[in-house]
Structure formats: C-alpha cells, structure tokens
C-alpha cells in the first residue's frame, strides 16, 4: 500500500493514518461531549427553569426538572461505565481459533479491532466517542447511553423551544435548541439501529457481514428466537424495565461461549 507523508516527519499507510486519527480524536470528542452536556445543563438551570417556575408554577417546574435530572444521571452513568468497563477481551483457551492479525485467542463472535490493536469479545464497532470498542461487556451501557441521550436531546429541544419562542428572546435558549434538535435527529437514527440490533440478537459487524455475503446465510444468526431472550444477552435480564435501570453488575456470561446460537460463524 502506498505510503502517505504526514507533516514530512514520518510516514504512515492510509489505514494506519486513519486508525491513528481515530485514536487521537477520542479525547477531543470526550471534551466536546462534556462541554455540550455542561452547556445544556447550565442553560436549563439559568434560563429555562426560572421561566418554567414563573409560568407553570413551582410543582410542575420541579416535576419537569426531576425528569430532566433522571435523564442526565442515566446519560452520565452509562457513559462512565461504557468507558470504565471496556468491551471485554478473550482469555486464552486451546479450543479457540487464533487471530490472523494479533495471533491471540479468537472465540466465536470475537473480532480484531485495528484501532485498539487487539481482539474484542462480541465486538459491535469501535466508537471514538468512548475511546474504545463496543463489545460484550459494555454493549448494555452503550445502548442505554444512546437511548437516554436521545430522550435528553428531545427533552432539551422541547424545553428550550418553549423558552426561546416567547419574547423577550433568549439567545442561550435559541443556541441550546439548535444543538438539541440536530443531535436528537442524528441520535434517533443511530439509536433505532442499535435497538433493532439487540432485539434481533446481532451486532453491527455480524449484520454487515451477513448482507456482504448473503449466500452464506449461516454466517449470521445469533438470535435466540425471541426479542426477550435477545435482550437478555445484552442486559442480563428479560425484563425491559429492569434493563433500563442503572446496573453496574457484570453479565453472567463470559462472552466467548455461545451454546444457544442457532448458527455459528
Ligand atoms: Zn486479534
Ligand atoms: Zn477498538
């Protein structure tokens, strides 16, 4: 592959340059995320809440604020655990095949991440926003982070619209509305995709692999036959309400052994 010169100081292939860029942009995206959340929280408490209390009364204002704080807590909780837990990595075992790239153990549903430079259990994709892969251990936190962030953006879209649509206009509420609407639309699509995946028991890599090679239908089908059983793999429970609640416990599966799969890769 033809090498690409960067700043004239060193050379990297386009693939390695792309992976290095994804690694470098991670801390920037983390700061962007913290700034956006801080800006929206600040705008809510300084510009929106006083308006709600004036026009809706203190009790309704407190109720709306409590709901907003519930969303904020779940966004931060799931983002934190998504990063801290990590995706999970395979432990060596003589029965496992070996990865062609890193030569490490590669059980079923494990894939090599060229950004992280290692194999990841039940890998879904590499996410620069969390500076890590989404895999077996943090899949739950990633999906919940998306779900609560989507609701949070919808909440802030409505709250800021109510404030900036009345006179005198409020610039902070206006900016907040624009950010919240744009992120809500983008997140809605992304969240719907990931919810669809966990309900069908697949990962992004498995579904793309299936459509990339439709003749080999056995390549993808890790569905357990019902959406309840499929969400249990990701959340450790078949109860949807319990799955949505904050939970720091590890899943009761090792992420390497998949006895119930209908077809295997
Ligand atoms: Zn590997
Ligand atoms: Zn990765």
Image (cartoon, rainbow, N blue to C red):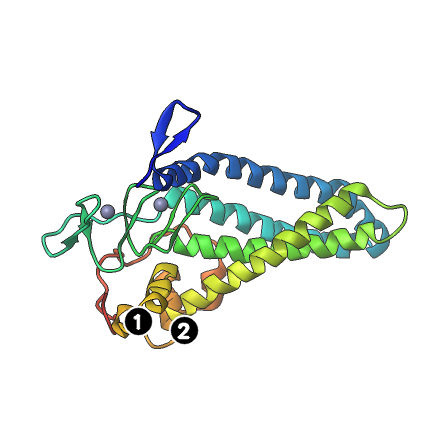
Q: Is mark 2 within 8 Å of ligand 2?
A: no
Q: Quadrant of the N terminus?
A: top left
Crowding at dot 2, Cα within 10 Å, few <14 / some 14-19 / many 20+, comes out as some
At horizontal 32% and vertical 44% (from top left) the residue drawn is 114
At horizontal 47% and vertical 37% (from top left) the residue drawn is 25
At horizontal 67% and vertical 51% (from top left) the residue drawn is 180
Q: Is mark 1 within 8 Å of ligand 1?
A: no
Secondary structure of the residue carrying numbered label 1: loop
Name the residue tied to disc 1.
221
**In the displayed structure image, the side of residue 175 where residue 57 appears, left or right:** right
Number of numbered markers = 2
At horizontal 37% and vertical 76% (from top left) the residue drawn is 226
- The correct choice, above or below, for 50 with respect to 221 in the image is above
Name the residue tied to disc 2.
227
Secondary structure of the residue carrying numbered label 2: helix
Q: Residue lying farthest left? A: 94
- The correct choice, above or below, for 131 with respect to 142 in the image is above
Q: Residue lying farthest right? A: 167
- The correct choice, above or below, for 88 with respect to 3 in the image is below
Q: Position of residue 203 (x, y in %)?
A: 37, 61
Q: In this view of the protein, can residue 66 be seen by the observer?
A: no
């Amino acid at each position: 592959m033809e090498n690409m010169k960067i700043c004239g100081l060193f050379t990297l292939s386009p693939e390695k340059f792309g992976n290095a860029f994804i690694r470098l942009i991670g801390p920037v995206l983390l700061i962007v995320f913290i700034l956006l959340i801080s800006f929206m929280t600040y705008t809510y408490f300084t510009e929106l809440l006083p308006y709600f209390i004036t026009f809706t009364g203190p009790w309704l204002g407190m109720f709306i604020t409590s709901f907003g704080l519930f969303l904020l807590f779940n966004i931060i909780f799931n983002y934190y655990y998504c990063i801290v837990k990590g995706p999970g990595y395979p432990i060596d075992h003589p029965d496992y095949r070996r990865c062609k790239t890193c030569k490490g153990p590669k059980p079923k549903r494990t894939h090599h991440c060229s950004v992280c430079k290692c194999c990841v259990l039940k890998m879904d994709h590499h996410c620069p926003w969390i500076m890590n892969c989404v895999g077996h251990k943090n899949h739950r936190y990633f999906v919940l982070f998306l779900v609560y962030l989507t609701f949070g953006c919808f909440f802030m879209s409505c709250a800021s619209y109510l404030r900036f649509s009345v006179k005198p206009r409020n610039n902070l509420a206006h900016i907040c509305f624009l950010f919240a609407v744009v992120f809500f639309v983008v997140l809605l699509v992304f969240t719907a995709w990931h919810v669809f995946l966990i309900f069908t028991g697949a990962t992004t890599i498995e579904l793309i692999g299936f459509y990339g090679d439709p003749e080999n239908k056995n390549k993808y089908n890790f569905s357990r036959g019902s959406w309840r059983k499929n969400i249990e793999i990701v959340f450790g429970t078949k109860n949807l309400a319990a799955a949505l609640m904050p939970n720091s416990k590890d899943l009761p599966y090792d992420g390497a052994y998949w006895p119930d799969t209908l077809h295997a890769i």
